Amino acid sequence: MIITRVSRGVLCTAALIVPALLLTACGSPAPSSSGGGGGEGGTLSIATGGTGGVFYPLGGGFATVIRDNVKGYDATVQETNASVDNMKLVQNGSAQLAFGVGDVVSDAVAGTADFEGSPLDICSLGNVYDNFMQVVTVEGTGIKSVADMKGKKVSVGAPGGATEVGALRILEAAGVDPETGVERRQLGAAETIAALRDGTIDAGFWSGGLPTGALIDLASDGDMVLVPIGEYAEPLASKHGEYYIKRDIPANTYEGQTEAVSAIATPNILVASSKMDEQLQQDITRALFENVEALKKVHPAAGDMNASTAGDVPFIKACPGAQAYFSEK
């Protein structure tokens, strides 16, 4: 088992200064004249996540690409608690597009877990990039594994997000009762880092793309520790679904991280309502996947976008318009 200590040094080169084009895309969600997603033009709201993660800045890049490439449409970004809430926002029409992590999207389609008995009428505009469940602590907590979290103060992510779903499942797989075995806190990425710094929590879970901005910030302190969790990928996949995959956080993802750390990855899906106009589905998908180079300048996770494989998501159907675009590839 490898525990990686992250020490002081030059900040990770992946630390990002969000370009001006992103900042113009982020703001309060505007009402969409397209309602449930018709093709008559208007403003599309993109449900993302907290500002410390990847969904929010990348969503800003998506909004700019849509504004510049989908005729008649503007787009804005909603800051949310992420995946669970995002699926519900699309279902009720408060958002037209949303990011969702694979386990939550699968639950939403099947009508299980947080969506028990109420499957959502949603479809996929493609697999965007992989989320990594990253478990982080700092030196001095004595935490070297998930099992070491017993009796500790642990953030499992904000309510209504994929981090919380995955964190509770990982704790259970490690033999830690998620209800009584830890003192649970429910914080977003930025709040988790602040709490680690001031000692009000001992460890935190975060599901996000690589690198995650909030963790880049913590790594600069010189005492961040990434806890390996890859051993739980197989039991989670067996119990919940094949969207849990053991993958490493590559060495040097964060400042001073000289060794790879085993983690659990799940695909991130861009979701829309099945009621959205098919031509609009196709236009959005085309715009996004044909502007990957621009999106990579917003966040390197966009480099994983691949139109030839983005439609191959077994647990949610591709939107018809998106499938029409992917079929051209």
Image: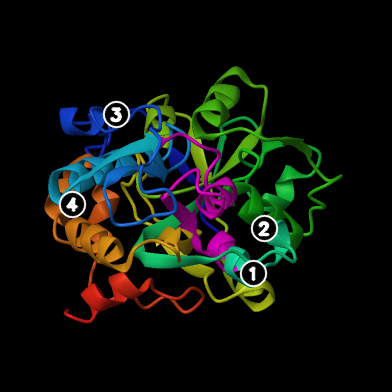
Depth check: give the residue in front, 238 or 306: 306
Q: Secondary structure at mark 4?
A: loop
Q: Residues within 10 Å of mark 4 (few under 14, many from 20)?
A: some
Q: Quadrant of residue 58?
A: top left
Quadrant of image for the C terminus: bottom left
Residue 89, placed above or below residue 327? above
In the rendered image, residue 33, in percent from the top left (x then y), is placed at 36, 42
Q: Residues within 10 Å of mark 1 (few under 14, many from 20)?
A: many
Q: Amino acid at mark 2?
A: Ile
Q: CA distance from mark 3 to mark 2?
A: 32 Å
Q: Secondary structure at mark 1?
A: helix
Do we see residue 261 in this rendering? no
* Left or right: 30, with 82 as reference point: left
Q: CA distance from mark 1 to mark 4?
A: 39 Å
The residue mark sitting in front, 1 or 4, is: 4
Residue 312, placed above or below residue 197? below
Q: Quadrant of residue 63?
A: top left
The residue mark sitting in front, 1 or 3, is: 1
What residue sits right under mark 1 in the picture?
Answer: 236
Q: Residues within 10 Å of mark 2 (few under 14, many from 20)?
A: many
| 1 or 3: tag closer to the N-terminus | 3
Mark 1–mark 2 CB contact (< 8 Å):
yes
The residue mark sitting in front, 3 or 2, is: 2
Q: Amino acid at mark 3?
A: Gly
Quadrant of image for the N terminus: bottom right
Please give the name of the residue rendered at 69% of the width and 37% of the height, measured from the top-left corner: 154
Depth check: give the residue in front, 269 or 192: 269
| 4 or 3: tag closer to the N-terminus | 3
What residue sits right under mark 2 in the picture?
Answer: 170
| 1 or 4: tag closer to the N-terminus | 4
What residue sits right under mark 3 in the picture?
Answer: 9
